[in-house]
Amino acid sequence: MSGIRGKDTRPEMLIRKGLHARGFRYRLHDNTLLGRPDMVFGGRSAVIFVNGCFWHGHDCHLFKWPTSRAEFWRQKILRNREKDAETARALSTNGWRILTIWECALKGRTRLPVNDVIARAAEWLKGGNECCEITGFRDKSDRGTGSVN
């Protein structure tokens, strides 16, 4: 587990490079904010989290409850979900807009084209929506559209 990255992951780097190429500037992993968001856009009062589906217990094909040390993993992942909710509440209360980009939007059988994910993130940054999620599509009827809440 010590070899697993908490920041500068491949999905995070794809989003960072894509948004930077579109002219967006941001701070990385700001430890003055709860949850240390992956990207902080201070002038837009916006933060982006790029979440791994396994570590945050996302309801998608990339997440499966481990069978070994099941109780340890259940407690860890459920606590991660609780911390995510606490972080979102605290950031929203303090006027921050939050975008969560899930790993399944960029990886696996439900992935979306990277340029589509970056375009959606850029649209959200320019707009005024408070909270948003970008996930991979759920089934063939949703193919290509992705899920943006």
Image (cartoon, rainbow, N blue to C red):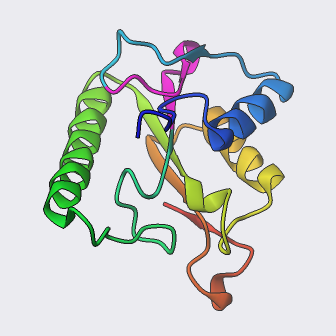
Question: Residue sitting at 78 percent across and 24 percent down?
Answer: 20
Question: Residue sitting at 65 percent across and 90 percent down?
Answer: 141
Extreme residue toward the bottom, this view: 141
Count of marks overlaid on the render: 0
Residue numbers of the magenta segment = 35-49
Q: Look at the picture and state if 94 lies above or below 110.
A: above
Q: Nearer the viewer, residue 87 or 54?
A: 54
Question: Residue sitting at 31 percent across and 28 percent down?
Answer: 91
* Residue 115 on image: x %, y %: 82, 50
Q: In the image, is 44 to the left or to the right of 13?
A: left
* Residue 139 on image: x %, y %: 60, 86
* Residue 11 on image: x %, y %: 65, 44
Q: Look at the picture and state if 33 lies above or below 70.
A: above
Question: Residue sitting at 61 percent across and 74 percent down?
Answer: 137
Residue 69: quarter of image: bottom left
* Residue 25 on image: x %, y %: 70, 16
Extreme residue toward the right, this view: 21
Q: Nearer the viewer, residue 123 or 4?
A: 4
Q: Quadrant of the N terminus?
A: top left
| Residue 123 covered by magenta stretch | no
